[in-house]
Image: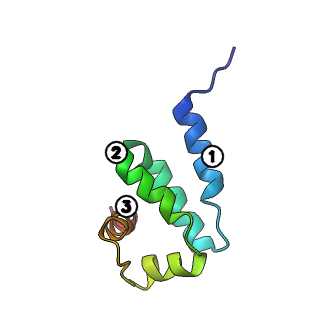
């Protein structure tokens, strides 16, 4: 019997939610999920889920044009995700 764990199900659902209308965002989120997501604390995961509700153009501005989000927690997660690409 092949059993799928809860974390695997969560990541699979998250991958689906991370599919965006922009290739740049798809690649950024895919890399982040593959390399860092499972190690996040619950608060950071909640902020990440909040990010996924933002419009693609806003996300693009935050990640690639260095527009600063006014909420510090959101801005910190954006910076963290951005740094995962350069690590």
Say which of 85 and 54 sits in front. Answer: 54
Identify residue for label 2.
41
Q: Residues within 10 Å of mark 3 (few under 14, many from 20)?
A: few
SS assignment at label 1: helix
SS assignment at label 2: loop
Query: Which quarter of the rendering shows the N terminus?
Result: top right
Identify residue for label 1.
13
Q: Residues within 10 Å of mark 1 (few under 14, many from 20)?
A: few
Residue at the location (55% across, 30% down)?
Answer: 6
**Circles 1, 2 touching at the beta carbon (< 8 Å):** no
Residue 49, position as x, y percentages in the image: 50, 56
User: In this figure, which colouring scheme has been used for the structure?
Assistant: rainbow
Mark 1 / mark 2, whichever is N-terminal:
1
SS assignment at label 3: helix
Identify residue for label 3.
84
In this view, the mark in front (1 or 3): 1
Reply above or below: 33 against 29. Answer: above
Mark 1 / mark 3, whichever is N-terminal:
1
Say which of 23 and 39 sits in front. Answer: 39
Residue 82 placement: quadrant: bottom left
**Circles 2, 3 touching at the beta carbon (< 8 Å):** no
Instruction: Measure the C-alpha gap from mark 1 to mark 3.
Output: 21 Å
Residue 20 placement: quadrant: bottom right
Residue at the location (42% across, 42% down)?
Answer: 38
Residue at the location (36% across, 81% down)?
Answer: 68
Reply above or below: 72 against 49. Answer: below
């Amino acid at each position: 019997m092949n059993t799928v764990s809860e974390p695997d199900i969560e990541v699979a659902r998250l991958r689906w939610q991370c599919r965006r209308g922009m290739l740049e965002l798809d690649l950024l989120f895919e890399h982040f999920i593959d390399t860092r997501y499972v190690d996040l604390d619950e608060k950071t995961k909640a902020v990440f889920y909040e990010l996924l509700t933002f419009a693609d153009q806003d996300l693009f501005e935050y990640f690639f044009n260095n527009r600063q989000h006014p909420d510090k927690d959101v801005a910190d997660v954006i910076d963290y995700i951005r740094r995962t690409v350069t690590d």
